[in-house]
Image (cartoon, helix red, strand yellow):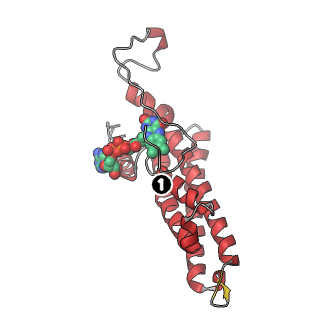
Amino acid sequence: MPELMGMRGSEHGVLEFDAVPVAESDLIGEEGQGLEVALRGFLDQSRAAIAQTCVGLAQRALELAIEFASQRVTFGKPIAERQAIQMKLAEMTTAIAAGRHLALDAARRFDAGATITLEAAMAKLHGIEMVGKVTDDALRIFGGRGLTTAYPIERIYRDARTLWFEEGTAEIQKTVIARELLGRSAAATD
Ligand SMILES: Cc1cc2nc3c(=O)[nH]c(=O)nc-3n(C[C@H](O)[C@H](O)[C@H](O)COP(=O)(O)OP(=O)(O)OC[C@H]3O[C@@H](n4cnc5c(N)ncnc54)[C@H](O)[C@@H]3O)c2cc1C
């Protein structure tokens, strides 16, 4: 497999199954219901978990941006004292807080035994849009230094982009959310 842009610590590979016999006793769920088992068996929970990853990664990007902005002096004072930078920091922390609430809501509902198809998709959708924007803003605050491997924001920026795809893209989350709103049954678009 070619190397990934981010999350390089995890290996990827392709598994191909061709006419593999499976004993009846090894079936998970009912025959012909594999998609449902996959979707409700782990995908909802995994989407909620990725939403939490988005929050954690974005929070770290914010912390690094605050640290850098407090130290980086241009034209006689730290850039953290510039209103333009403060506006970015305020927007970043607000977006992260919203993501945290959505992720926690999905997790709490799951712990209470509820089906979280809608909540997990909403948390993942917001999480991936949020972490993209927050890491964009963090990199901008770092200026050109942020593009170098000397600063950890470079890696966080790359890692954040892998979260857009794992367990479904934004378009797929929106499809799931709309389907839940409209009361439609699970489609192969998951
Ligand atoms: C870090 C990482 C880890 C991953 N881990 C796994 C894993 O463990 N197991 C696994 O099976 N896969 C894994 N994937 C694959 C991941 O699930 C897919 O990349 C993702 O579902 C998108 O599919 P695709 O790349 O084939 O894009 P495509 O399906 O080709 O989509 C391309 C574009 O078209 C849009 N699109 C596609 N279909 C529709 C539609 N019906 N309506 C509207 N828009 C649409 C998509 O949103 C996207 O923008 C991983 C990917 C990454 C990056």
* Depth check, front residue: 133 or 70: 70
Give the x, y percent position of residue 122: 46, 52
Q: Relative to 24, does residue 117 appear above or below in the rendering?
A: below
Q: Relative to 184, does residue 84 appear above or below in the rendering?
A: below
In the rendered image, the quadrant that contains the N terminus is: top left
The residue tagged with tag 1: helix, strand or loop? helix
Left or right relative to 14: residue 9: right
In the rendered image, the quadrant that contains the C terminus is: top left
* Depth check, front residue: 186 or 132: 132
Left or right relative to 111: residue 18: left
Residue occupied by mark 1? 161
* Depth check, front residue: 52 or 64: 64
Q: Relative to 62, does residue 88 appear above or below in the rendering?
A: below
Q: Quadrant of ligand 1?
A: top left
Give the residue at x 40% y 53%. Answer: 170
Left or right relative to 119: residue 181: left
